[in-house]
Amino acid sequence: MAARTARIVSATGVRRVFGSTAVLDGIDLAIAKGEVVALLGASGSGKSTLLRILAGLDEEATGEFTTRGSQAVVFQEHRLLPWKRVADNVALGVRGKDAAVRAATALTEVGLADRARAWPAELSGGQSQRVAFARALVREPDLLLLDEPFGALDALTRLRMQALFGRLHAHHGFAALLVTHDVDEALLLADRLLVLDAGRIAEEIDVDLPRPRAVDAPGFGALRRKL
Ligand code: ADP
Ligand code: MG
């Protein structure tokens, strides 16, 4: 990474112990402004733990880690408030007189302008996750932390959500840490892949493919075979 590139995430020697097990045992990580980094690793390798640390949700971690600017988190489950309408869920945490307008704009961006008055229970899984993205975007985050955001969706909906993510990133330019166990998703969306294993970043792969990407694009298969 060029020294002049602004860093949104800087982490050095991050360690997290549960009981007698160091789940994270010396993680170094830097994410530049606008960069999408995918975090891969087997189940239980500590991906969510690292994401929670960066989100400020884990007070027991040690090491140095800072994030710059504003951030928003999207989890695998949408975590919408069932007693608030879709638009009100999106406007949560947005201050000012234009909160409703900004929420409407964000809903339009994720293709759900017509569901603003709906209740979360009336939405499909994919629609709910679109609302979760709108709720994150409305805060204009410098950093998006995503924990398997498409993991609970069926294959077709996942493809559509991946395409949506690509468009949103092209438009907003946020930096992102995308936790996923889907190698193709990582190669489609990320600038760089990190593989977590035994508490460390075991592998790092740069993805120098033009966007938008497709799984049958030249160079895609070669990168996949590296993993
Ligand atoms: P991943 O997201 O890669 O599947 P996690 O970060 O959720 O993995 O978990 C990594 C390891 O840490 C697992 O073995 C898990 O059981 C353990 N772990 C996570 N959170 C806790 C906790 N609050 N207390 C005890 N163990 C935990
Ligand atoms: Mg996890």
Image (cartoon, helix red, strand yellow):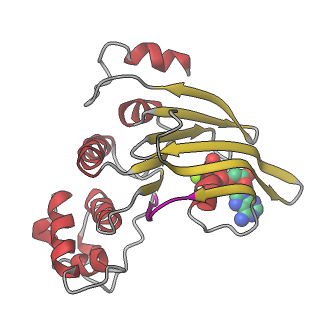
Towards the viewer: 217 or 27: 27
Report the residue at 28% width, 74% height from top: 90
Q: Is residue 113 above or below residue 98?
A: above
Which residue extends farthest front?
Answer: 4
Does the segment drawn in magenta span residue 208?
A: no
Residue 180 lies left or right of residue 211; in this view the side is right
Q: Is residue 50 above or below residue 30?
A: below
Q: Quadrant of the C terminus?
A: top right
**In which image quadrant can residue 119 be found?**
bottom left
**In which image quadrant can residue 77 be found?**
bottom left
- Numbered circles on residues, count: 0
On the question of residue 138 being in view, the answer is yes
Residue 147 appears at what percent x and percent y? 50, 54
Which residue extends farthest left?
Answer: 114
Report the residue at 31% width, 42% height from top: 162
Report the residue at 68% width, 42% height from top: 28
The magenta stretch is 67-75
Residue 173 appears at what percent x and percent y? 32, 48
Which residue extends farthest right?
Answer: 20
Towards the viewer: 99 or 108: 99
Report the residue at 25% width, 31% height from top: 212
Residue 59 lies left or right of residue 208; in this view the side is right
Does the segment drawn in magenta span residue 71?
A: yes
Residue 61 appears at what percent x and percent y? 74, 61
Residue 196 appears at what percent x and percent y? 65, 38
On the question of residue 179 being in view, the answer is no
